[in-house]
Image (cartoon, rainbow, N blue to C red):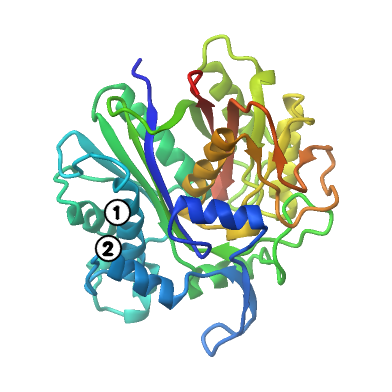
Amino acid sequence: MNTISIVADNIFSPLGGSTASNIEAILKGDSGIKRHAATDKLPFDYCGAKISDDQFAKASEDHKIDSSYTCLESMCIASISQAINETALDLSSSEVGFIISTTKGNIDLLKENDKNIKGKYLYHFASRISKHFNNANKPVVISNACISGVLAIITAKRLLSIGDYKHIVVLGADLISDFTLSGFYALKAMSPDPCKPFDKNRTGINLGEAASCIILSTETKSELPIQVHGGASSNDANHISGPSRTGAGMISVIKSSFGQVEGFQKDKIDFISAHGTGTLYNDEMEAKAISNFDLNRTPINSFKGYFGHTLGAAGILESILTYHSLLRNTLFASKGFSESGTSEEINVLSKHVEKENLNWALKTASGFGGCNAAILFKKRNDV
């Protein structure tokens, strides 16, 4: 089987327009989550991580993105452009594929009533991105609730393994919109304050917006000595919005991911980057799944306290931070956590911790409809 390596990446979020700037902000303990006031169309205050107009404008200027693109498309183009600057890849090549992860796409176009109907379709949004880089291949769209980003990486790994492409651009992006805010508010899932994943006093999620990009390859020499292993998805068929109370779906994808690596032992896992939304049931479910594998003492974190829940971008953004933890030999704190709030005791990080040699990390995700996903990242032995 071909070795899947990560060539380059980028995070475009409220904390910065590069992976390095986002990591620097995390190390300082900064968060993109702010309080936003109610409006005529959205009659409630909320906490969320929004990208500023100034950041949009600077990205458009820096990457020469014209005004014909929507805000979401501009974010995506900026993220890919920043990532590709680190490589010599020609994205117009037929050997390059595009996978786009999003839950809502150009959701803000709904405000335009019947105008630009085509632009509201996910396939059209994805095609606009790939065509900007003169890529003639049909992009793959992954839209499976909140596991979309992790599932996009798994899909890229499989397509590269069977030789469909030599390189794949995996991009995840979503915006905060009145539609998504109203939906989560109706479910009583939104926290009125900055979220606290796995904490005793957690009260729900915050939403966030971001675009994140990972470029995977079977051929190009990687400047990032990280390899992608395992990877599985499942559906526990429990409820339209609630996860399995037993963690059965999450247990199955973790077990499958471990089983895809010959001779893999669970004690190799140096830390776990959880989905960790800050809702009562998600965090409880993940804690049970982790406990099922006797990984209670393995360090675990959630990145939602820095970025909010970025939906289709979350799995990619958080995967980038996960393998950069391996590269830096640094475990990032789970912002907002102070006191354990799950029935199974797990080792949630309350502060940044430096380690001597981190090698393996497990990334998990779960979402509406009972979907679950997991994937493994490994630092190369020659580092």
Element carrying mark 1: helix
The answer to whether any part of residue 235 appears in the image is: no
Q: Are marks 1 and 2 in contact (CB under 8 Å)?
A: yes
The local secondary structure at tag 2 comes to loop
Q: Which residue is mark 2?
A: 63
To which residue does mark 1 refer?
81
Marked residue nearer the N-terminal end (1 or 2): 2
How many dots with numbers? 2
Establish if 23 lies above or below 110. above
Q: Residues within 10 Å of mark 2 (few under 14, many from 20)?
A: some
- Identify which residue is drawn at 39% across, 28% down: 5
Amino acid, disc 2: His
Residue lying farthest to the top in this orientation: 263
Question: Can you give x and y, in whole percent of width and height, for residue 289 in the image?
Answer: 71, 33
**Occupied quadrant, residue 127:** bottom left
The quadrant of the picture occupied by the N terminus is top left
Q: Identify which residue is drawn at 44% across, 55% down.
A: 18
Q: Is residue 142 above or below residue 102?
A: above
Pinpoint residue 172: horizontal percent, then vertical percent: 41, 51
Q: Is residue 71 left or right of residue 366?
A: left
Q: Residue at x 58, y 51 (%)?
A: 240
Residue 104, x across and y down, in percent: 41, 61
Please determine whether, in this image, residue 353 is positioned above or below residue 62.
above
Left or right, 165 with reference to 154: left
Q: CA distance from mark 1 to mark 2?
A: 7 Å
User: Is residue 230 shown above or below 177?
Assistant: above
**Left or right: 381 in relation to 336:** left
Closer to us: 218 or 165: 218
Report the front residue among 211 and 284: 211
